[in-house]
Image (tube, rainbow, N blue to C red):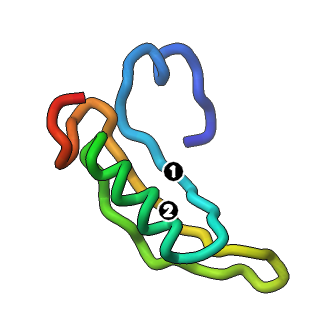
């Protein structure tokens, strides 16, 4: 998406979350909690970037749909 304006954010919807954490266990814990709140893609592969601390993962979520924890 190149441009975000009021039309795009007038109601909740799909989001892309880039998660950076110290280790993969932390990424899994955060992803697990987000799965309870919203419908998500689940965790993708955690990756390390050369010369940067921690690990990163990307998660796609739909804030209009509840996850495994029931209604939001």
x then y, percent, for residue 24: 52, 76
Q: Which residue is mark 2?
A: 58
x then y, percent, for residue 30: 45, 57
13 vs 68, nearest the viewer: 68
Q: Is residue 23 left or right of residue 17?
A: right
Instruction: Evaluate if marks 2 and 1 touch, with contact meaning CB atoms under 8 Å apart.
Output: yes
Q: Which residue is mark 1?
A: 17
Q: Quadrant of the C terminus?
A: top left
x then y, percent, for residue 51: 84, 82
Q: Is residue 62 above or below residue 26?
A: above
Residue found at x 49% / y 74%: 25
Residue found at x 44% / y 41%: 15
Q: Is residue 6 left or right of residue 15?
A: right
Q: Is residue 2 above or below residue 57?
A: above
Please identify the residue farthest to the bottom as the structure is shown: 50
Which mark is first along the chain, 1 or 2?
1
């Amino acid at each position: 998406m190149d441009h975000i304006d009021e039309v795009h954010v007038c109601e909740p919807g799909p989001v892309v979350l880039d998660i950076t954490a110290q280790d993969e266990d932390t990424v899994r814990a955060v992803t697990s909690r987000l799965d309870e709140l919203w419908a998500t893609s689940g965790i993708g592969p955690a990756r390390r970037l050369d010369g940067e601390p921690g690990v990163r993962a990307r998660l796609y979520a739909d804030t209009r749909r509840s996850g495994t924890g029931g209604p939001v």
